[in-house]
Amino acid sequence: MRGGLELKGGLLALALTLAACGTTQPADVQEQSAAERPTIEMVDSELLPVGESPVRGAPDAWVTVVVFGDFQCPFCGRLAATLDQVMAEQPEGRARIVFKHVPLDSHPHARLLAHASEAAREQGKFWEMHDLLFDRAAELRDADPRAVLRGMATELELDVQRFERDLERPEIAERIARDEALAEELGLNAVPAVYINGGYIPGAQPPAVYMRAIYDVGEATQGAVDDGEMKREEVYAHSVRALLPRSRQAQAAQAEQESAQARIARVPVYQPGRPVLGDDETALVQIAHFHSLGSEPSVEMHRRLVELQSADPQRVRLVTFQLPHSDDEVLAFAHRALAAASRDDAARGQRFLSWMAELPEDAWSEGPKLLERIDDKLRELGVDPDGVNAVASRARLDADQRLALELDVVGIPTTFINGQRVVGLAPLEEVERQIDEKAAIAERVAQVRNISGQELYEAILNAAEQQPGAR
């Protein structure tokens, strides 16, 4: 007996355990053949309805993966690529994916892109447009999005005139509004979010998390049907009734944890040995950026922060902390090289960091060639490459990683603006707004108390912590 759904425990707890331990997929994941699978009209869930949303995969799948996403969200793009990989390894009939729209107000083109996916759906190509929107995210962000969308519609061989008319159709706006209303009803406050037969998994997790969750839920539902605990056509509706209440409890616990993390953080921005841009004494705003080389979202966030700092070099000071996003040996060497370049000269460290940020993405696949380029750059900056593997370089990197744990930094990029946490690749305008807001407060404190530099920074943190309901 494989056991009914009630014996499986909370899916969120399972998923987070897998994320921590890196459990691999079951060996027999490919065992079921298409010939063994009947076609059945599934009963929908009243709590988490598939409704008329686009579906990829078998309509009578044992496992339904509902994705709430935003086409301008880089983490949603990462999740889409992960789920492509996961679905490619599923046996016939095991899983299907359902997409729900949650275009965030912080992403200026997100609603337009949601409309574009639905306009393509009118001509039978939702998923093709879905994939293109994530693949062309940078182009859509940096160019005229409507012009780019016209080109994409042509590439997909859509009727472009009809596509552009459909972008404005009120029926499409209503579909998206229904998805947003459902997300609000579920208490979602961030995307991406995934529900696997009602079991909630937040964020963009590694492939193993979804592989294991899909396998376990599939086994549980098949076992329950075999044992007569539920009818085959009620697999999805019954599973959601069992798992969604637990998901809501887990979401409430997660929201409480996020609230705790949102409080003012005392990031030690005046410790030596890290890359720095800006004046130690005149700066009103201290930006601490936890950064990983070679990570596109992190590198892009670094570029935005450098742009903002360069526009106001006396008022804004940028300090970079290192948090490698993987254990890759070349990445680890590059981070130790950054520590070596920064050890005695923070500005030199920043120059090395800027050089690394300009490397093309495919440079990270060069292996030994990239290591040679790093050595050459260090020599150009007057740094002995032998110092990369010195105890001091490793210690600096270890210290930054320990600090990230203390501050509950669980992903990159994570940025602190005068102690206020900003998670993910924040829009330039939003970061600029926060800088202006924090600078105005800091300027008042500096004038009243006649202080500057580190003393001003500590006073700002103290004042923020004393505010009622400080976050």
Image (tube, rainbow, N blue to C red):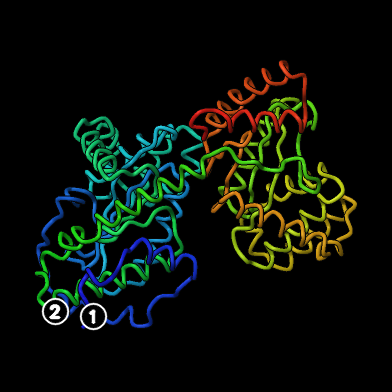
Residue 264 position in % (x across, y down): 58, 37
Above or below, 75 relative to 287: below
Q: Which residue does the numbered mark 1 point to in the structure image? A: 2
| Numbered tag placed on residue 226 in the rendering | 2
Q: Residue at x 63, y 64 (%)?
A: 365
Q: Nearer the viewer, residue 230 or 249?
A: 249
- Along the horizontal axis of the image, is 204 left or right of 372? left
Q: Position of residue 251 (x, y in %)?
A: 35, 50
- Figure check: 34 above or below 19: below
Q: Is residue 36 above or below residue 56?
A: below
Determine the image quadrant of residue 197.
Answer: bottom left
Position of 47 with respect to 19 (left or right) is left
Type of residue at label 1?
A: Arg
| Contact flag, marks 1 and 2 (Cβ < 8 Å) | yes
Where is residue 415? Give x, y as percent: 60, 41
Q: Residue at x 58, y 30 (%)?
A: 466
Q: Residues within 10 Å of mark 2 (few under 14, many from 20)?
A: some
- On-image quarter of the N terminus: bottom left
Figure label count? 2
Judged from the image, the secondary structure of the residue bearing numbered disc 2 is helix
Question: What percent of the width, then of the height, locates residue 290?
Answer: 63, 48
Q: Nearer the viewer, residue 218 or 167?
A: 218
The amino acid at mark 2 is Asp
Q: Nearer the viewer, residue 234 or 12?
A: 12
What distance separates the C-alpha of mark 1 from that of mark 2?
9 Å
Element type at mark 1: loop
Tag 2 or tag 1, which sits nearer the N-term?
1
Give neighbour class at mark 1: few <14, some 14-19, many 20+ (Cα, 10 Å): some
Q: Residue at 59% across / 30% down in the picture?
A: 464
